[in-house]
Structure formats: C-alpha cells, structure tokens
Image (cartoon, rainbow, N blue to C red):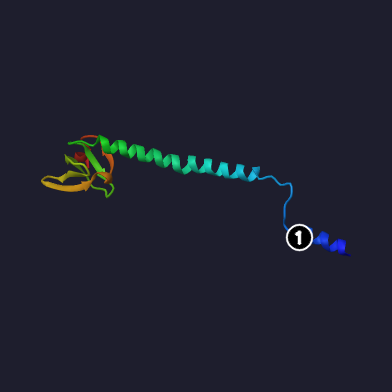
C-alpha cells in the first residue's frame, strides 16, 4: 500500500522530467520578430519620413498642418513656422504639426 501512495504522490507533483525548453524559446523569438516587422519597423520608417519632411520645409512651400490648416510658409524658425493662411492673415505653428507639403498652386484651387 505504501508503494501506491508514493507513486500517486510522485505523479501529482507536477514536476516535468525530460521536457525541452527549446520550443518555448523559439516561440518567444518568433513573437519578437513578428512584433519588430509589424510594429517597430513601420513606426521607425514613418519617423524617418517625417524627419525628412521637416528638413525640407522652406519659405514659400505650401503645407497642411495636423489641424487641417493649409497655408504658405512665410518664415522658418528652429521650432516654429510663420504660415500665411489668407491675405494678411498669418499664424505661427510648430514645425512638427506639418503633415504634408502640397504642390505649389494647390492653395489657389482650394
């Protein structure tokens, strides 16, 4: 009877013998590779494109801001732009709020 008790106790202990951790490590590695290609890499690409856009801003460029304001750049500073949105109406906006540069002449067609 003592034999059966010891055997039942050993089976219920939950100790795994001879199992490999390699599939678990492989699954975690695949998960991180998936996260890199689906989230991190596209975000880095967007940041690089936005940085390139910020560097290309110059006087006379026609832009659209994140708030939907369209205008022509009159003055470029380190962190801010002076944008003419109508005749004799100028606003100061942050450079980082610019979402796109539109082709010249687009503002007249709006």
Q: What element carries label 1?
A: loop
Q: In which quarter of the image is residue 7?
A: bottom right
- Looking at the image, which residue is at 78% across and 58% down? 10
Residue at the outermost right position: 1
> Which residue is at the front of the view, 46 or 20?
20
Q: Position of residue 17 (x, y in %)?
A: 74, 49
Q: Which residue lies furthest to the left in this view?
A: 88
Which residue is at 29% across, 40% downward? Answer: 100
Q: Which one is in front, 95 or 27?
A: 27
From the image, tell me which residue sits under label 1.
12
**Is disc 1 surrounded by few (<14), some (14 to 19) or many (20+) residues within 10 Å?**
few
Residue sitting nearer the eye, 66 or 14? 14
Q: Is residue 41 left or right of residue 107?
A: right
Q: Position of residue 20 (x, y in %)?
A: 69, 45
How many numbered dots are placed on residues in this image?
1
Across and down, in percent, residue 87 comes to 12, 45
Question: What is the quadrant of the N terminus in the image?
Answer: bottom right
Residue, x 87% and y 64% (percent of image)? 2
Image-based side of 7 in relation to 78, left or right: right
Residue 103, located in which quarter of the rendered image? top left
Q: Residue 86: give x, y in percent of width and height.
A: 15, 46
Write down the quadrant of residue 73 in the picture: top left
Picture layout, residue 69 above or below residue 48: below
* Position of residue 39 in the picture relative to residue 62 (left or right): right
State which quarter of the image contains the C terminus. top left
């Amino acid at each position: 009877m003592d034999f059966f008790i010891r055997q039942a106790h050993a089976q219920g202990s939950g100790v795994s013998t001879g199992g490999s951790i390699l599939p678990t490590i492989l699954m975690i590695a695949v998960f991180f590779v998936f996260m890199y290609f689906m989230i991190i890499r596209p975000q880095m690409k967007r940041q690089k494109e936005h940085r390139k856009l910020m560097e290309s801003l110059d006087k006379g460029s026609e832009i659209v801001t994140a708030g939907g304001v369209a205008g022509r750049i009159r003055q470029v500073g380190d962190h801010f732009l002076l944008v003419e949105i109508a005749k004799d109406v100028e606003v100061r906006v942050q450079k980082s709020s610019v979402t796109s540069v539109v082709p010249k002449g687009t503002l007249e067609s709006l």
